[in-house]
Image: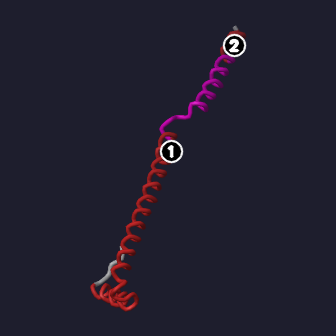
Amino acid sequence: MMNFSFWDIILILIVSLIVFGPNKLPDVAKSMGKGMAEFRKMADQAQSVYKKETDSLKNEVEDVTKEPDAEPAKELNDKKDKKDDKIEEAKNTNN
């Protein structure tokens, strides 16, 4: 957030008073307040959506890293079993 000193605020008020006049100044302040509130609301919504999406992606990554990929392990076990079978056949053939 911006840090304004006392004199910065006084200068802004004086310039605003000169530019808008004393009659319009309350309306301008009201409009600026509404605009700031709307901006904060939109920023909060954007932050919420961003957090939701990043949390979703984070959970997906965690799920993928936690679950071992069964398909490559199954293929390796199948190949090992086939070789073991061939070794047994070769042993039986030589006897």
Majority secondary structure of the magenta segment? helix
**Which sits in the foreground, 80 or 63?**
63
**Looking at the rendered structure, which numbered label has been put on residue 61?**
1
Image-based side of 19 in relation to 89, left or right:
left
Q: Residue at x 50, y 35 (%)?
A: 67
Q: Residues within 10 Å of mark 1 (few under 14, many from 20)?
A: few
Please identify the quadrant where the N terminus is shown: bottom left
Residue 92 x, y percent position in the rendering: 68, 9
- Gap in angstroms between the C-alphas marked 2 and 1: 44 Å
Q: Residue 15's spot in the image, x, y percent?
A: 37, 90
Q: Is residue 69 magenta?
A: yes
Amino acid of disc 1: Val
Q: Secondary structure at mark 2?
A: helix
Q: Residue at x 50, y 48 (%)?
A: 57
Amino acid type at mark 2: Glu
Residue 5 relative to residue 45: left or right: left
Q: Secondary structure beneath disc 1?
A: helix
Q: Which mark is residue 89?
A: 2
> To which quarter of the image does residue 70 belong?
top right
State left or right for residue 74 relative to residue 4.
right
* Closer to the camera in the image, 65 or 18: 18
| Callout 2 touching callout 1 (CB < 8 Å) | no
Q: Which residues are magenta?
A: 65-86
Please state, as top left, top right, bottom left or bottom right, where the C terminus lies in the image: top right
